Amino acid sequence: MPSQAMQDVIDGLRDQQKASASQAPPTLEELRAAFAPAGRLHPVPDDVLVTEVTAGGVPAHWLAAPGADTGRVLLFLHGGGYELGSLRSDGELAARLGRASGMRVLFPEYRLAPEHPFPAAIDDVLAAWRWLRTDQDLSARSIAVAGDSAGGGLAVALLVAIRDAGDALPAAAVLMSPTVDLTSSGASMTERADQDPFSTPALLRQLASSYLAGADPKTPLASPLFASLAGLPPLLVLVGTADLLLSDSERLAAAAAQAGADVTLEVRGGPAPRLPDHARHPRGSRGHRSDREVPAGPVGHGRGVTAVADQAAGCLHPGRSGGKPHQEPADGTIGAAGRG
């Protein structure tokens, strides 16, 4: 069950949806200007240095919290259904992940649909990756990737593209409710239709259609669930039980594990991992139990963002062995179970 803090935010979102039901649909520009993954914007903290940069031709931002290691980088890919999202909507989450992991964050503003359909977004993400490797002279092992929703799908697509090119892969990837199946064929697309406060099946299908612009929805770099997942680095997959994309995460974790990847799947009560929740610190990436509590107070729009960030940092440590998926139970207890 969601915590009371999370339930309050969910109820607020549903109230907003009811209030806007009788209003004229907003324009795309209005949607982009108002986009806030958890119902309200959270600014980048004042002590985080934000620097504009062009990364391989892609507009981007460096985010550096005090003490960040300039030799280690988190490539953060925002969500928004490939049509929405920017530093304004997702910069706070990216900054928190960077702070907790002690890494600088590169936040690319990849091109958005419908003006720039597939493969524009993945092309931009690849360009930013190559810029880190060549222009910034960073080793692949000094880079991690994180992505939320559509950004999570782009993160997996990036790993697949890097592997297929025969290049060295990043150290790890953190995927928050990743969109990896643009056919919308997962069981949760119908089973969770009345539970997800963020999306509807119709909206997700419309966003997918706009992004694909006629491309085959099973194209691996558009829907990486249909790609070979062999040889990928350690993956941490986070999702909520009320999320329409729950099945995307479950099937991705199972397929990656079957292909030999080291996968940790954490399924928590409630919607996608974008809401404040004073949750128990989840198990570390090596399977160590931690009973440390996330401090009370606002944690931004990620699900237990501080806990998520700590796990992201843990993913960077070497020594994880492949092929065994770990699953965190939905009731918030600590445990591990193999997936068939």
Image (cartoon, rainbow, N blue to C red):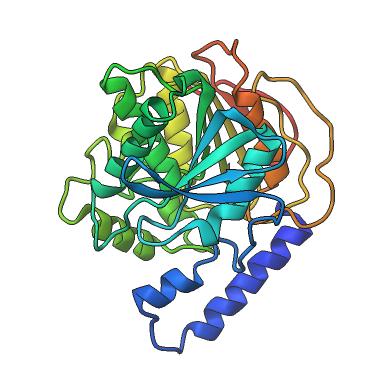
Residue found 41% across the figure and 18% down from its top: 258
Residue found 75% across the figure and 55% down from its top: 3
Image position of 104 (left or right of 156)? right
Q: Nearer the viewer, residue 31 or 137?
A: 137
**Is residue 172 at least partly visible in the picture?**
no
Q: Position of residue 256 (x, y in %)?
A: 42, 24
Q: Position of residue 62 (x, y in %)?
A: 53, 45
Q: Nearer the viewer, residue 47 or 226?
A: 47
Image position of 154 (left or right of 250)? left
Q: Position of residue 70 (x, y in %)?
A: 59, 31
**Is residue 33 at least partly visible in the picture?**
yes
**Residue furthest out toward the left:** 214
Image position of 304 (left or right of 184)? right
Residue found 53% across the figure and 61% down from its top: 89
Q: Nearer the viewer, residue 45 or 201?
A: 45
Q: What is the number of callouts on the image?
A: 0
- Image-quadrant location for residue 336: top right
Residue found 66% across the figure and 70% down from its top: 11
